[in-house]
Image: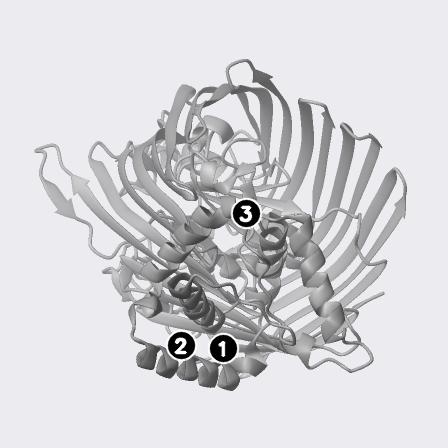
Amino acid sequence: MDCISLLALSYIEGLMHSNSKLLHSKKGLLMAPPIPPETGQVNRQTTKNLNFIFPFTRLNSRLKRISFSAILALGFCFFPFHPFAPVLFAEPEKAASSDEQLLGVEEEMKTDEMGEKTQKKFEEMFLAPEEFAESGSKHARKLSESPSAVTVLNKDDIKAYAVSTLEEFLRIVPGVQVKGLSPANKTLGIRGFTTVGGNKVLVLIDGQEINSNFFGGVFWRLLPISLDDIERIEVIRGPASNLYGANAFAGVINIVTENPQGLKTATLISEVGAYDNGLGTMFFKGKLARQYSPFSILASADFNQFQSTLDPDQTNAQVFRARVKALYEPAADARIQLDLAYLLTKWDYYSQFMYLNFKLKPTFYLNTVSTYKNLKFQANYRRLYLDADVVAPTFLIQYFIPQFNSYMDNLEGRLEYTQKLPGRNRLTLGTGYLMNIFYSNILAKTYNDEKRFEGFFQDEWNIQKNLFFTAGLRYDYNSVTNQSFSPRASLVYFFRPEHNLRFSYGQAFRKPSFFEYGMRLKSFQEIGRYIDIFNKILYSPGLKNEKISTYEIGYQGHFFRRLEASLTGFYSQYRDAIVITKTFGFTNDPEYADYYGGELSLKFYLLSNLDGFFNYSLDKVFKRTKQKTYLPLEDFAPKHVFNFGFRLKPLPRLLLSLSGNYVSQNQDFIIDPDKSVLIPVNAPPQKLGPYFLLNCRVGYQLWKDRLEVGVKAFNLLNDNGRQMPSEVWHRADGQTENIGGEPVGRTITGFVEASF
């Protein structure tokens, strides 16, 4: 039902209450069954609640007639948009007769006098479903009971709102900020931790870590999947090292890919996008699924290309990807999953100091997950090649590091066990081992490795029906910074059905990346024998882990199952931040930074064919000095961010969606390329934004659900600002180079998707 229907029903029920008579209709579609005596109190309570919300029953008879006439007039005007309109306007030979409809209503009411069955069917068709999340507890759990602030995005959300890349799509999550260096290079942060390297957020794909342990961040163009491979995305906002260890500092993005079961046999996707000044992006993909019970397999191949917004003739990235996912389920409680991906990539990476032209090189991913009853074992391997030519205005960088050849190996093994205990407890135990290998021809020690060991436990105690307590502790050891402990505790209290409060505390840490602690260059080591300062450039042994402690309070509630609201407030203490020194090494900052802020999220389900969302996030940072005075760090993180979106299906085969992202003013730094002749010299911080991105998608199905064509628009209003600072480098040969971020640019993309 929509709001008009609710108004009409409230009026009718008011008449029922005031006259103490039952409503019968012999020819209409609405019919009320006799009310048993024992349910009278329930109906009076329902009427009381409706009168509180819609006080029509308090009006006199004349005003009631006027109100009811207005309701009928509004209902007639908006009837074409009503979810039942297609049913009532169906072909005569396909529509049920009035007698059949009445008989169906009578039979349904007879089978369940209390209306539970009808209510259940109504909720399944039109109301907000109960969401579940795995990331906050390592197993499926109601989102309302999660001990962490979690946002869940499903495949329908991706189809409606993903008009560009995966990282751009994640903008719609409250608390998430994205900064773009170029169309192919983005960095992502949560709750203000949006650094160039994006090394404070952990990204997982089916449980496999995707962060590069060399830099600590994520190379988004080197993911083993594309957007259409994703079944669900769960985003934890806030520290999560108690379950996920290093790098789960500001949050976790857990991506779950689709399984072969239930997929169409074959899928073909083609997308071509254009900037205002020329060709922008291209994406082509083919996907094939086969099922031979109990075995199923999914194979896909795709090609993706991004052009520069400054010069459409210049390619930012080219990616070819092939992937196979196999699933074997010999029993209901046993499952083996194998995922293998191969990529060939060629791309340019822009930073605040230089840009790197990465050559065409492969990347391998292997991920295996085996589950048997309460036991889960996961093992994975990844090899990443990074061979690049370096272009930099600084003599020391350009002369001593003109190019490099590198590769990185990552090996992981994890074991988890979950067991329900007496007293409504669930215990989760886990352990794991990880090894990283780094090789590069420019390092003094060409072959380097680091080892990590982890172990954790978590107990979930359902103290009462409306009270949940979760506590856990994790121990991490690595060969670089030794040991770290990460505790967490959370209490969820349902003070009313579908309304709860959450109180939580957690600690997290970020291990220094190899780039921060181990970049001792071969050429600098030789010069360092004579000039000591060269021993400190890019080489910073002895770094400690970054640490954060966060206190959270949250509320989540449903209103009439039409509106879902959540509100979270947090206060974080940031310690031992890794900062860059004047000699371009790294050190732990002795001063502290405190963060506070919050997120408001609303999801509304107005009609069966209309829903949407709105969210707002606030982030404020203060630096605490040794003298215990607080200094505001204005604008180094966007203070205000809000998002909105809605999707409408006015016709059975037509889907419309619109979304917007507003980011307030912030600032960042970049080197002054014309002054950085010998060593890098920072330019004054540049102010960025504010900016507003408006995106839309229109899709039409030509052949049921097998063929869809449409148009997607990213940055429809062409807000041409930069999300990262930029400077022009005047080279000695008279040419100019752009160092830093490119303008966002507008992209209009046409797409065709066919399934067989």
Q: Amino acid at mark 2?
A: Asn
Q: Secondary structure at mark 1?
A: loop
Residue 96 position (above or below residue 342): below
Residue at 58% from the left image edge and 51% from the top image edge: 115
* Tag count: 3
Neighbour class for label 2 at 10 Å: few (<14), some, many (≥20)?
some
Query: Quarter of the image holding residue 25?
Result: bottom right
User: Residue 361, how many percent across, how many down?
Assistant: 68, 51
Contact, CB < 8 Å: mark 1 with mark 2? Answer: yes
Nearest the eye: 197 or 616: 616
Establish if 573 lies above or below 48: above
Residue bearing mark 2:
720
- In the rendering, at what x and y percent does residue 692 appear? 37, 71
| Position of residue 624 in the picture relative to residue 676 (left or right) | left
**Residue 313 shows in this picture:** no
Kindly identify which numbered label has been placed on residue 746.
1
Residue found 84% across the figure and 53% down from its top: 289
Q: Find disc 3 in the rendering and name its residue.
A: 130
Q: Reading the chain from its start, which is encountered first: label 1 or label 2?
A: 2
Which mark is nearer the camera, 3 or 2?
3
Q: Work out how far the residue at label 3 is from the one at label 1, CA to CA, in angstroms.
A: 37 Å
